[in-house]
């Protein structure tokens, strides 16, 4: 697909977030807010579903038009090195949220105010949001973005990521129908 990559001046965090835009921008268009996961997005790690969700979003946006906000919020905001440390703690039995806390960090350090700023800069204050994460929905709504519709991402369930997905559902309240598997 042909897409435009948009950068943004003066985001308060200084992070190099980008928007990938395909098709016309119109009120209510499809938006995926994707948090960076180097291990999953680039290297195909099977611990998580991030790479599958990113590819799913790219395919949908290629088909319908829309935006991916690629947010440099690696490791739910704790960064890559800390996420790798958290993986070691998980391998010793912790869930993915308490492993962050064992490192003295919060379970999820992401905020989404900059996503709202980026959407407004693109002229979008009404969107269809692609997510299963209730805090993304609430946070964007609190930042003044109208979410006309929420579209769930698929459930990319594998034996390797089953605990991770189960913990997202039970600990962070993600709407994931883990009884079924989709492509
Ligand atoms: N700290 C930590 N971060 C992780 C872990 N696994 C994935 N991540 C990060 O979690 C983020 C993706 O978050 P998810 O909770 O999978 O999904 P989400 O983006 O909140 O929700 P959806 O919009 O429904 O996909 C990325 O920044 C990943 O790097 C982990 O075990 N520990
Ligand atoms: Zn991941």
Image (tube, grey):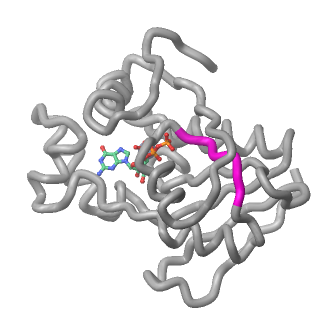
Write down which quadrant ligand 2 falls in: top left
Q: Say if 58 sits above or below 23 in the image.
A: above
Provide the major secondary structure of the magenta segment: strand
Q: Say if 67 sits above or below 87 in the image.
A: below
x then y, percent, for residue 68 = 67, 55
- Is 59 situated left or right of 116 in this image? right
Displayed quadrant of residue 106 = bottom left
Is residue 50 on the magenta stretch? Answer: no
x then y, percent, for residue 16 = 55, 77
- Given residues 166 and 80, the one toward you in this image is 166
- Given residues 47 and 95, the one toward you in this image is 95
Q: Say if 112 sits above or below 149 in the image.
A: below
x then y, percent, for residue 74 = 41, 60
At x 50%, y 49%, the residue is: 137
> Total number of numbered labels?
0
At x 16%, y 46%, the residue is: 99
Residue occupying the far bottom of the picture: 10
- Is 117 situated left or right of 67 in this image? left
Q: Give the range drawn in magenta.
A: 126-131
Residue occupying the far top of the picture: 179
- Given residues 84 and 65, the one toward you in this image is 65
Displayed quadrant of residue 9 = bottom right
At x 61%, y 61%, the residue is: 145
Q: Which quadrant, please, contains the C terminus?
A: top right
At x 44%, y 49%, the residue is: 39
């Amino acid at each position: 697909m042909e897409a435009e990559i948009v950068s943004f001046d003066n985001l308060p965090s200084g992070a190099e977030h980008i928007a990938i835009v395909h098709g016309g921008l119109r009120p209510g268009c499809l938006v995926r807010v994707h948090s960076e996961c180097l291990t999953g997005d680039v290297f195909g790690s099977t611990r998580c579903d991030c790479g599958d969700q990113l590819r799913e979003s790219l395919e949908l946006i290629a088909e319908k038009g829309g935006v991916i906000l690629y947010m440099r919020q690696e490791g739910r905001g704790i960064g890559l090195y800390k996420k790798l440390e958290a993986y070691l703690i998980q391998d010793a039995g912790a869930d993915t949220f308490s492993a962050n806390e064992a490192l003295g960090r919060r379970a999820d350090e992401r905020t989404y105010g900059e996503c709202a700023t980026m959407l407004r800069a693109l002229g979008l204050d009404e969107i269809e949001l692609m997510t299963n994460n209730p805090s993304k929905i609430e946070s964007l709504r609190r930042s003044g973005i109208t979410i006309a519709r929420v579209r769930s991402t698929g459930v990319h369930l594998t034996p390797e990521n089953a605990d991770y997905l189960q913990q997202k559902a039970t600990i962070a309240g993600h709407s994931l129908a883990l009884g079924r598997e989709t492509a």
